[in-house]
Image (cartoon, rainbow, N blue to C red):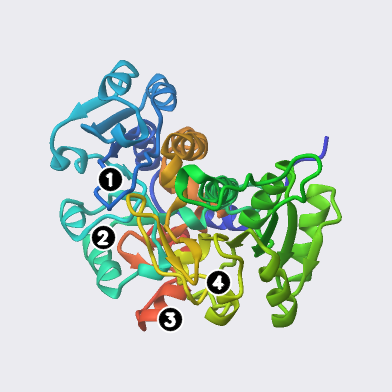
Amino acid sequence: MKEQAKSPFSELAKQASLQPKEQLLEKQQHEHKLLIGIPKEITYQENRIPVTPASAKLLVSNGHEIVMETGAGKNANFSDSQFSESGVQIVYSKEDVYKAHVILKIDPPTKEEIDLMFPGQYLISAIQLTNLSELYIKQLIAKRVTAIAYEFLRDEENTVSIIRSMSEIAGCSAVLIGAEYLSNASGGKGEMLGGITGIPPTEVVIFGAGTVGEYAARSAYGLGATVKIFDNNITKLRRLQDNLGLKLFTSVLQPNIIQHALCQADLAIGALRNDNGRTPHIVSEAMVATMKPGAVIVDVSIDQGGCFETSDITTHTNPVYLKHDVIHYCVPNIPSRFARTASYALSNIFTPILIQIADSGGFSNYLWENSNFRNGVYIYKGNLVNKHIGSRFNLKFKDIDLLIAANL
């Protein structure tokens, strides 16, 4: 059988290592078992947790230690006792959590949490580019940590796995939320999303043919609704139709066609994203004003400004408002509404990665061998290594490949 091709970078990195073998062996043995700290999320209405009790048990059985702040899993309906029975050490201060070599969390750490960090520590969390500040980056650089953004992590198929997983939840959720606010129980006009025999189906308009749009379309079509999808990317529209095996109504973003579709829509979903900043307003306020009274807008893109000109950020505790007789649901972080499911999805991705890191001999070796994981690193041992962030804040950045190859 043909030998699998080795990564040229991996070979270069190993050849460039100037450390004696005895030091490398000692380092690998030291890093083989991970000490993982999981703090309680303090961001408003963040209910998810990165590791479930079942996954924690698997990590502990592989020889790793987990230190978790009390109440970290409460909002996802996981108790301290469940984690404790899985071998997790429950502590009552954030300071004790941040003594761990690896910090695993959902949202980026606050200034107070960064103050608790130490040189050589590893941070795996979100980075949230839309809310990113220069001060945050400089604080992490000053701490000389290695920071990994899970939004950038890719799998073997080059998919941004965590973003896709959360987008699947958001897409399905958008339809369920729309159905909820169309019903009498939530103050809607009393229509069932989908339809029954003899009654015309409800109409769902989706802006965006990415993962959110695809899963929203799957859910809406499965309930029996008529689905119309808009996106300027023809390749995405074609792929969505192929994935669903359906010839749905698709269109590029033409204002007159959008206007006509919205006039008939019972539910409109914003699912467009912009990799470089704010999502453009695809739907003007004048277009919203022509929608049916009691129609529902679910703007999943609100964390980047929203697809609808009438969208304003709401919260899980006060999720909707009425404008032009149209119900608007504009809550960022929709997956947190289904925190237990989202936590399972996150845990299914994080747990194998942590096991692979240890099995490869630690973070250093894993970074040598795994370019997909390397893609998530934006600060490496106190050095900014993300070109986009460096250009955005006019900060000096370095090539991570060269740093790793040189053992810096």
- In the rendered image, residue 177, in percent from the top left (x then y), is placed at 52, 48
SS of the residue under disc 3: helix
User: Would you name the residue on which mark 3 appears?
Assistant: 391
Looking at the image, is mark 1 or mark 2 earlier in the sequence? 1
Residue bearing the label numbered 2: 144
Q: Where's residue 331, x and y in %?
A: 42, 57
| Residue 294 coordinates in the image, percent (x, y) | 54, 60
Residue at x-position 61% and y-position 55%: 212
Q: Nearer the viewer, mark 2 or mark 3?
A: 3
Mark 3 / mark 4, whichever is N-terminal? 4
Which residue is tagged 1? 41
Q: Amino acid at mark 1?
A: Glu
In the image, what residue type sits under mark 3? Ser
Left or right: residue 259 compared with residue 356: right
Residue 342 in view here: yes
* Callout 1 touching callout 3 (CB < 8 Å): no
CA–CA distance between discs 1 and 2?
A: 23 Å
Mark yes or no: residue 365 visible: no
User: Residue 361's x, y, as percent?
Assistant: 44, 37
| Residue that numbered label 4 is attached to | 274
Q: Choose the circle earlier in sequence order: 2 or 4.
A: 2
Q: Is disc 3 surrounded by few (<14), some (14 to 19) or many (20+) residues within 10 Å?
A: few
**Mark 2 is on which residue type?**
Arg
**Could you say which quadrant of the image residue 91 lies in?**
top left
Task: Label 1, secondary structure: give it.
Answer: loop
